[in-house]
Image: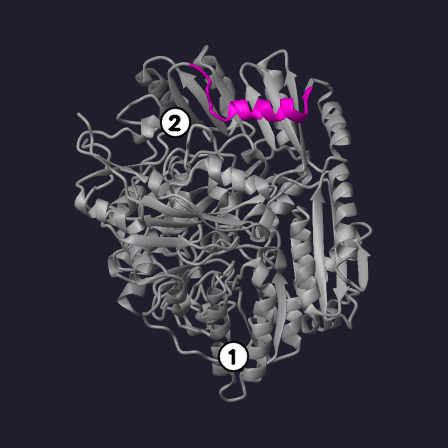
Amino acid sequence: MNPGLQELTRLFPPSRLLHRPGELAPYESDALTAFRARPLAVVLPESHDEVVAAVRFCAQHQLPYVARGSGTSLSGGSLPIEGGLVIGLNRMNKLLRLEPKERIAVVQPGYINLQVSQAAAPYSLYYAPDPSSQPVSTIGGNLAFNSGGAHCLKYGMTSNHVLAAKVVLPDGETVTLGSESLENTGPDWLGLFVGSEGLLGIATEITLRLLPKPETYHTVLAAYDSLAKAGDAVAAVVASGLLPGAMEIMDSLAIKAAEAAVQAGYPQEARALLIVELEGEIPQVEAEARRLDQVIRQSGAYEVRVAQGAQERMKIWKGRKAAFSAVGRLSPDYIVQDGVVPRSRLGQALQEIERLSEHYGLRVANVFHAGDGNLHPLILYNGRVAGELERAEELAGEILRLCVALGGSITGEHGVGMEKKAYMTEMFSETDLAAMQRIRRALDPLELSNRGKMFPGGEAPALKHSGPHPLEQAGVIWRE
Amino acid sequence: MTADVLYPTSPAEVQEAVRSQPRVLPRGGGSKPALSTPGEGQAVLDLSGLSGVLEYDPGEYVLVARAGTRLAEVEQLLAQNGQYLPFDPPLVEQGATLGGTVAAGLSGPLRQRYGGVRDFILGVQFVDGEGSLVRGGGKVVKNAAGFDLPKLMVGSLGRLGILTELAFKVFPFPKATATLRITFPALEAALEALYKLAGSPIELYALDLEAPATLVLRLGGLPEALPSRLERLQSFLSRSGEVLQGDTETQYWRHLNPLNLGEGYLVKVALTARQIPALEKALGGAPRRYMSAGNLLYMAWNNDLERLDTLLKSENLSGLVLKGTTPRPQIGIDLGQVMGHRVTAALDPQGKFTPYHP
């Protein structure tokens, strides 16, 4: 046995220390299945102290490690480091405290996103960030990658809903960042920590802010004979001064796929579908709905449907949320990107993506958060055809560069991880990245915590064709 | 002793100043003297010349400006397009700048609806302690690339870098607003109503508590829905209160923006509503106003600062002195921790931004 492993057996019982090839296999990849790496071992801590012990062990042996929840990262953020340790946090999955009156929930990192809203539901409260992975993704992972969802324009991302975190730093020390207050009187250390992709430490206790559930929703589905018209409709909604909770667009490829998968009742021949959702107090939403309907009617939609009741609303969203896995049915493999462009450049970006798609001879389906310019091009390829994966990767890279060139970002919500680290230099100068590196090395001089992610360079495991994640094949998670 | 004052008008001049001076303190409009009065050996970087809006397309909900740009200029530009800074920064007419507002981490009553300055900052450019010009974040409303340096700078008080450029998310201002003032017989009843409102789907733009027992609630939205929402609010609380509308309402909130609460120090305190009862017992007659459902307190303190420091510590609270002069504007419990110390040292290895030698 590896001497390091030997020592780990003193820290973790055999049931929570995995090191046999068969045990390690499920941990070799995350939702970015093109990458794969074999860790030395996986430990499954059940307490803060055990996380500290694992981190101290790694510091002492200069062993790189990655903390992992459900492994739904689309950017390869939870991909193991070859020969390093995986600290699996799924057993730290408790709701520690729910205080409906104060509207907070304190959870362990392995607690599932959707469970927060479920636990809060009896008190008419909910947890706002809603990544499509929410039935399986954990709060710890959401926090590390500052997960988004469909409601970010109005309500922000994970970072805007985390109040405090107990964090194990890479040297094993523990700090508490933030407080139960929404306000603060010094540098926002918690703000820095959220979204740091596991490079600055591991959160073991997280205080979340809960919001009262909106009194009512008004969900509109509009069908267009061109993507440009749908894009213009979004601009018109914004110009009207309305601030919808969500605005989503799907193109024809995504519509057909979603329809085939979940029979959402979408108009199948549409070239583009726009979903707009208002929410809030009943009198306000009723007044907004009248204005919205006017805007949509003038936007050239050839069919407009308004969800009558919760069931119809869920059906509209079901198609949207299932679109990704549905598109997966059209193709053996796909890559999804999440670049952001200024809203006014959406049309230009989509046109350019279409051109690139033709140039590379690969189909691209588009589903995106139109309200905040967050694209989600799905690049379809067949990993069994020699060279297709590489072509798909190249096309994906072109799209990221396009987003930056249009004044946007390489990632809106999936994070940089392994996948996009080579493109960080498109967005940030050497000086910018050096400053971020200085911050990182101040806390982790040996770069043990999630080594090889976010920053360009460093060793990367070889690209391998490996098909969709098992959970994705089972339809449990979606890439978005 | 008169401190040196430098007037950089470009990021390059800020870099030069940081490189050439042993210790520097940034100053915008000087509206928060407790944070912008130099200590011994500190040169002041007056950033009022580093001013101007660089990018603003109302359809994008994004505004980019130099850090020394005055809030008044920004708000005027936004208002022309029916938009606003949703975190509602104070001290607008007093000359406060975007940079100073971010560095002090200040928001106002309207933060109740969509969040504070940390929730609306998108991008930052700053000069670190070695004189490097660093960018973080971006100029789009959604972005997850790299460390969130924009958020880190909120409340950083010039200790981590000199802000030179900032990008914010902005929103449309509600087409109509109305305010309801309700005085309760005692604090307990007012707090009970505050909790009831904060946990309800009623969407308030402001949820303030005026000591001792008055709630001030601001509604915003479409004009045709406002009368019925106001009625619903009144019946929800079983009280009719005093309704402010039109110019009276606008003026009411405008008068609050300068935070002219009373004589003495002006202090911000971060807290939660559950800490209010104990604090109210301890504070005595100090003029004060709680905002955003009890998450934010601004108060005037006309007494020894040490007394307030002790009082806040005993309530497990932290405060920030904004007006009045003190070498240590951060009072109450010590928020320092090892992560903070190390990151500060990484961005400012030579201690250029250290306010005093302990």
Judge whether residue A192 can be spotted in this image.
no
Same chain for the residues under marks 2 and 1 in the image: no
Residue B350 pos. (x, y %): 19, 45
Residue B57 pos. (x, y %): 54, 52
Say whether residue B59 is left or right of residue A284: left
Q: Secondary structure at mark 2?
A: strand
Camera-nearest residue between B214 and A92: B214
Residue B345 pos. (x, y %): 24, 45
Type of the residue with mark 1? Ala
Type of the residue with mark 2? Gly
Instruction: Read off the chain for label 1.
Output: A
The residue at which mark 2 appears reads as B319
Q: Which residues are magenta?
A: B243-262
Residue B17 placement: quadrant: top left
**Quadrant containing the C terminus of chain A in the rendered view:** bottom right
Examine the rendered structure and indicate whether residue A69 appears above or below residue B183.
below
* Residue B255 part of the magenta-drawn span: yes
The residue at which mark 1 appears reads as A392
Residue A427 pos. (x, y %): 41, 63
At 59% across and 28% down in the image, what residue appears?
A: B207
* Residue A244 part of the magenta-drawn span: no
Camera-nearest residue between B243 and A13: B243
Say whether residue A475 is left or right of residue A186: right
CA separation, marks 2 and 1? 53 Å
Say whether residue A106 is left or right of residue A49: right
Examine the rendered structure and indicate whether residue A34 appears above or below residue A96.
below
The circle on residue A411 is none
- Farthest bottom residue? A386
Judge whether residue A417 can be spotted in this image.
yes
Examine the rendered structure and indicate whether residue A183 appears above or below residue A372.
above
At 66% across and 76% down in the image, what residue appears?
A: A329
